[in-house]
Amino acid sequence: MESVEVFTTESKGRGLKAQKEFLPGDVIFAEPAYAAVVFDSLTHVVCHTCFKRQERLHRCGQCKFAYYCDRTCQRDAWLNHKNECSAIKKHGKAPTENIRLAARILWRIEREGSGLSENCLVSIDDLQNHVESFDEEEKKDLRVDVENFLEFWPAQSQQFGMQYISHIFGVVSDLKAGFVPDLSMAAFASPIAYLVFFAPRIELRALSKISPGDELTVSYVDFLNVSEERQKQLKKQYYFDCTCEHCKKKIKDDLMLAVKEGDNKPSAETVKEVIQFSKDTLEKINKARLEGTYHEVVKLCRECLKKQEPVLGDTNIYLLRILSIVSEVLSYLQMFEEAAGYAKRMVDGYMKIYHPNNAQLGMAVMRAGVTHWHAGLIEAGHSMICKAYAILLITHGPSHPITKDLEVMRVQTEMELRMFQQNEFMYYKMREAALKNQKIQVMPEPSNEAPPSLFHKKE
């Protein structure tokens, strides 16, 4: 932790400052999770130690809940799983991820105490829990969590008071599946650093040049929203009023609400109607996605785009949201050529809004590149995959699994591009023959969830 220092201000509380210069892609610091658990939805498909997705996992013979890659992962997990294993057996079933995470934190406190851990800058007791800011619904949820926790917590383990248990639940409500105390002090603002997960650890990486004394800031929410909406979301989920430059000056709000210019500029009333139509359509799309009726999603998107295109600018967030959905769903349905056109428009809009080293931008460009590749548009596909690789080298680093997968794609598309440039006719003939003998790998099923937020609050 020699590279950062803790500072405190009356208006913002604790924060972190750099003590040396960092360049884009530099790791400011990396830290293992104090405690980590697998999401409820993934308990059967990922290893509970290394968090890697595996086709064949070995189940714990005692609790029948935890799964591991092999004996090595199972042995490595035993320190954290031992108490959990016996508690699950006695309780009869595994509790929710929130309760499992709180339990693992408290078992570690039982073993080591709640003071500063090695190389940590702040103790668990000193972290802000925001319980006093909870509304009635959140307080009700907290009471339910505490009651369920007490039913699960073994009598032979150290007993903690209700107030302290509530403090733990309040602290972990933001970082739901993994708890890293020091990184909760990085302030929200227009980001100069990015947090990347290497379960079960996390890295803080520089997105741009950072000088000694600069405050380290990260984005708690996706930037692709107007300032007022981001501020509302931050206030609701994290209980503070954001005063970063982007929010105060409403930077790029004009781009995100852009309308067509020129002789046919739409009236304010027309813009209002199209925005409302877009919001209503997005609700219908969410319903159709939940039901798995993806052709209906495509139909709704096409209808919405027909309304949007004469009115909204190319960087308008409502247009970009529809473009993102329709390109993703069409790719899933293997309608790659149409998907590629929409994906290209989406990426062009994102490039004007996002920071050039934004991770969400990198992931979107990667998805668009793969879509173009599957569509046989090898030149554009390779170019986008290279662009995405350059971004993710900075945001995720060369050893992250996503970056490694992207490097394989970059090499493969480079080889195909050379073949295409040497003999375009033969390239398409060989591609056609390959597709006849081997099905194109189906794209992942479209998710109805928002892009993962680093600090994810329980709904």
Image (cartoon, rainbow, N blue to C red):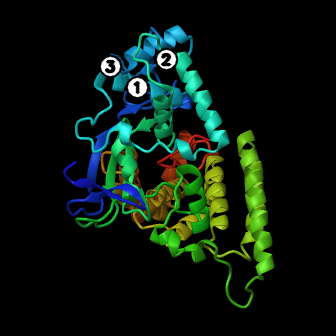
As drawn, is 314 to the left or to the right of 50?
Answer: right
Q: Is residue 151 visible?
A: yes
Residue 207: image quadrant is bottom left
Determine the secondary structure under disc 3.
Answer: helix
The one nearer the camera, 279 or 141, is 141
Determine the secondary structure under disc 1.
Answer: helix
> Residue 107: horizontal and vertical position, in percent?
38, 22
Q: Which comes before the other along the chain, label 3 or label 2?
A: 3
- The kind of residue tagged 1 is Leu
The one nearer the camera, 121 or 9, is 9
Residue drawn where x is 60% and y is 66% of the image = 228
Q: Which comes before the other along the chain, label 1 or label 2?
A: 1
Determine the secondary structure under disc 2.
Answer: loop
Q: CA distance from mark 3 to mark 2?
A: 17 Å
Image height of 285 relative to 169, above or below: below
> Residue 272: horizontal and vertical position, in percent?
77, 73
As drawn, is 68 to the left or to the right of 312?
Answer: left
- The kind of residue tagged 2 is Trp
Q: Which comes before the other along the chain, label 3 or label 1?
A: 3
> Residue 456: horizontal and vertical position, in percent?
52, 45
Residue drawn where x is 26% and y is 59% of the image = 18
Label 3 sits on residue: 79
Label 2 sits on residue: 153
* Callout 1 touching callout 2 (CB < 8 Å): yes
Label 1 sits on residue: 106
- The kind of residue tagged 3 is Leu
Image height of 353 relative to 430, above or below: below
Q: Is residue 419 visible?
A: no
Q: CA distance from mark 3 to mark 1?
A: 13 Å
